Image (cartoon, helix red, strand yellow):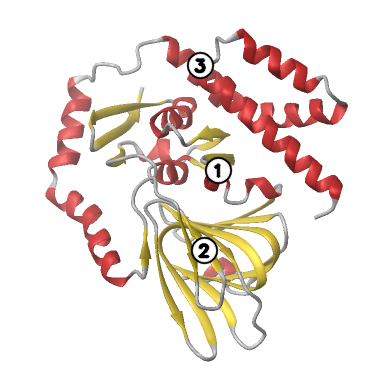
Amino acid sequence: MDESKQHQDILLDEAVDLIIRLQNDPENPVTAEMINAWCGRSALHEQTWRRIEKLYGASGQVLNYQRRAERYTVMSRRNVLLAGLLFLGGGTFLYTAGPSILMRQRADYITAKGEIRHIRLEDQSQVTLGPDSAIAVEYVQSQRVVKLLAGMAYFEVTRDTQRSFTVYSDNTQITALGTAFEVSNDAGIITVGVDHGLVEARASGELSMGERLQQGQWLVFDPARQTVERSERSANQIASWRDNYLIAEQEQLSSLVARIGRWHNGRIVIADPSIGRKRISGIFDLSNPLVALEAVVNPAGGKVYQLTSTLTIISPL
């Protein structure tokens, strides 16, 4: 990475820290003074701040207004009934719990909610496994295969010209050569981001011919709808969850909720599918997942109801 690019990434990190500080304490005048002083250091500082401020957008503003009101609203009879049906419906509960039991039997490495684990594989490749995630590793003479059974992982691959390195997530395969990249599976939506190097993503349908991604390139594949979205992002946005924050650019709410849910104890249920399909941009601090969840949901016209420590419902306001 050249010095100019590295300097820009450092500024972006600093701007993200300031945004998170602002989100956590919006009424503090010291924060505003810090932001003004930081922006005044150079034109590039100012440009970086405007970029992050635009990305942060309405999600932060709505959250700040919500914080001034009562945090949890008394639920209507309709919502209580809905929550009771969701919680007590045996089929729904078993469908949610079942895969976790099967996953533990298949996984070589697994993490709990909020846990990030660093793993060194036998070829010295390294994996950073996100919370509530699982992988299975299959190394043979001709190839290296990692199956992302759930969640998210960041891979730093040791180059081996004799054996390819392929990550499978559902029916999507991502093959790399001496590279570092992220793969996540949130609510069935596959995301691939390349830190450096080159990877190829391939799946049936829209990705049947393969899609090559280079440094900074980002791909979101929705197998259910057979849609592929491509974008470019800075290096610090790749697997930003390693530093306990998420950066989203017009991402589907259901996917973001699933990702934040890996830091949040208990189940999160989106009661209205139309909310889950909405697009959200912003920067979200994962050190307080419930606040992050509110920041994602409120701009979409939704409300977060925490019924118990193990069940959270998202429904229309």
Left or right position of 54 against 94: right
Q: Quadrant of residue 100?
A: bottom left
**Label 3 element class:** helix
Label 3, label 2: how far apart the Cα atoms are: 36 Å
Q: Residue at x 47, y 40 (%)?
A: 253
User: Local crowd at mark 3 within 10 Å, few (<14), some, or many (≥20)?
Assistant: some
**Label 2 element class:** strand
Tell me which amino acid carries mark 3: Asn
Residue 116 visible: yes
Residue 299: percent from left, percent from top: 49, 26
Q: Residue at x 68, y 51 (%)?
A: 231
- Residue 127's label in the rendered image is 2
Label 2, label 1: how far apart the Cα atoms are: 15 Å
Which residue is disc 3 drawn over? 64
Tell me which amino acid carries mark 2: Val
In front of the other: 211 or 48: 48
Return the disc, 3 or 1, that comes first in the chain's sequence: 3
Q: Residue at x 55, y 43 (%)?
A: 243
- Residue 243's label in the rendered image is 1
User: Local crowd at mark 2 within 10 Å, few (<14), some, or many (≥20)?
Assistant: many
Residue 225 visible: no
User: Disc 3 vs disc 1: Cβ atoms closer than 8 Å?
Assistant: no
In front of the other: 207 or 310: 310
Residue 17: percent from left, percent from top: 62, 30
**Label 1 element class:** helix
Asked if residue 59 is positioned above or below residue 215 in the image, the reply reads above
Residue 46: percent from left, percent from top: 80, 25
